[in-house]
Image (tube, grey):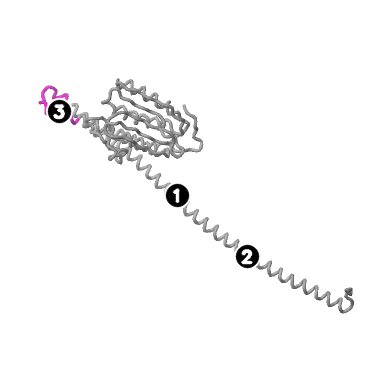
């Protein structure tokens, strides 16, 4: 069957139908385009609204951060004022008390009975102890305000000078066992204070032992962080009171038995906390003590050992 080409009126009708079809299709496309423009505009509006809300939240957080920063700066100023007050307002009258007690003791030399003389000695010793407490409190407060200058540190480089000082001043029979320790990322001066306090405590509380055995080294890792330790074979303590161990001016042994002000372990905890680590102890009465600590986990911390 052949298809005749449209001619005359038929051709005109065919052309009209084609035009109508195109116009109709164009109308559909136009509606669709308009709908797409409306949807795009709605999405853009929603995104702008969401962006405005996010910007408002960011501004609110920035305002809170600025307020918090101002509060911290004010607190630091208060701490500085407190340190000044402690170092001047408290130490000055303490020096007067100690000075006049000494003058009174000198003026009554050989004329006081034994009991009054003992009273003066007790006052003088209490003045010395109070002065030590004030000095330690000042040192403790400075740890919060001082800047940290972290670097790669070999713990052995900090441990050896501490041991040398302990051996020179104590004159004790001490067996030192130093094992390999990894390099760590820390403030060298602050980490030196940590070892000074922990080793000093190990020497002090192992005084009844002959020989005293003090071990310093590393014990693997905790969550990717090197675990360092200081261990002694001293008198130890009851773990039931471990919650008091790192408190300022807290003591688990009578001052008559072991000297000190009770600030050493509080200082250790403060320094370790500033490094993003933690410190804990394992001990038992009469079985010595081991103090473990970590120093955070910076991404550039080295892994080699010395």
Q: Which residues are magenta?
A: 104-123
Q: For the residues carrying marks 2 and 3, which lies nearer the camera in this image?
A: 2
* Residue for point 27% across, 37% down: 238
Any part of residue 54 in sight: yes
Tag 2–tag 3 contact (CB < 8 Å): no
The answer to whether 93 is drawn above or below residue 162 in the figure is below
Front-lying residue, 231 or 145: 231
Residue bearing the label numbered 3: 118
Point out residue 60 in the picture as x, y percentages from the top left corner: 47, 54
CA separation in Å, label 1 and label 3: 58 Å
Question: Which label sits in the foreground, 1 or 2?
Answer: 2
Residue that badge 1 annotates: 65
Q: Secondary structure at mark 2?
A: helix
Percent position (x, y) of residue 106? 17, 24
* Residue underneath mark 2: 39
Residue 199 image position (x, y, % from top left): 34, 28
Nearest the viewer among 230 and 38 is 230
Asked which secondary structure carries label 1, the reply is helix
């Amino acid at each position: 069957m052949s298809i005749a080409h449209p001619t005359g009126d038929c051709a005109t009708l065919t052309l009209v139908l084609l035009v109508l079809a195109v116009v109709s299709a164009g109308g559909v496309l136009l509606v669709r385009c308009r709908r797409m423009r409306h949807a795009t505009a709605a999405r853009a509006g929603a995104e702008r609204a969401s962006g405005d809300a996010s910007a408002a939240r960011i501004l609110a957080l920035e305002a809170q951060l600025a307020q918090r920063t101002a509060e911290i700066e004010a607190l630091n100023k208060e701490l500085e004022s407190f340190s000044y007050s402690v170092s001047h307002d408290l130490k000055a009258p303490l020096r007067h008390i100690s000075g006049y007690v000494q003058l009174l003791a000198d003026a009554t030399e050989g004329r006081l009975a034994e009991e009054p003389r003992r009273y003066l000695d007790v006052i003088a010793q209490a003045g010395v102890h109070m002065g030590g407490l004030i000095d330690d409190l000042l040192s403790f407060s400075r740890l919060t305000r001082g800047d940290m200058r972290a670097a790669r540190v070999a713990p052995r480089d900090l441990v050896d000078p501490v041991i040398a000082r302990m051996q020179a001043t104590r004159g004790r029979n001490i067996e030192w066992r130093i094992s390999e320790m990894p390099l760590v990322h820390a403030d060298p001066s602050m980490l030196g204070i940590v070892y000074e306090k922990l080793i000093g405590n190990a020497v002090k509380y192992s005084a009844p032992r002959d020989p005293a055995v003090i071990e310093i080294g590393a014990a693997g890792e905790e969550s990717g962080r090197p675990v360092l330790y200081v261990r002694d074979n001293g008198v130890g303590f009851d773990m039931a009171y471990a919650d008091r161990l790192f408190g300022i001016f807290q003591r688990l042994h009578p001052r008559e038995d072991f000297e000190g002000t009770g600030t050493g372990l509080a200082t250790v905890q403060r320094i370790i906390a500033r490094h993003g680590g933690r410190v804990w102890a394992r001990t038992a009465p009469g079985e010595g003590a081991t103090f473990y600590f970590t120093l955070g986990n910076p991404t550039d911390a080295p892994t080699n050992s010395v």
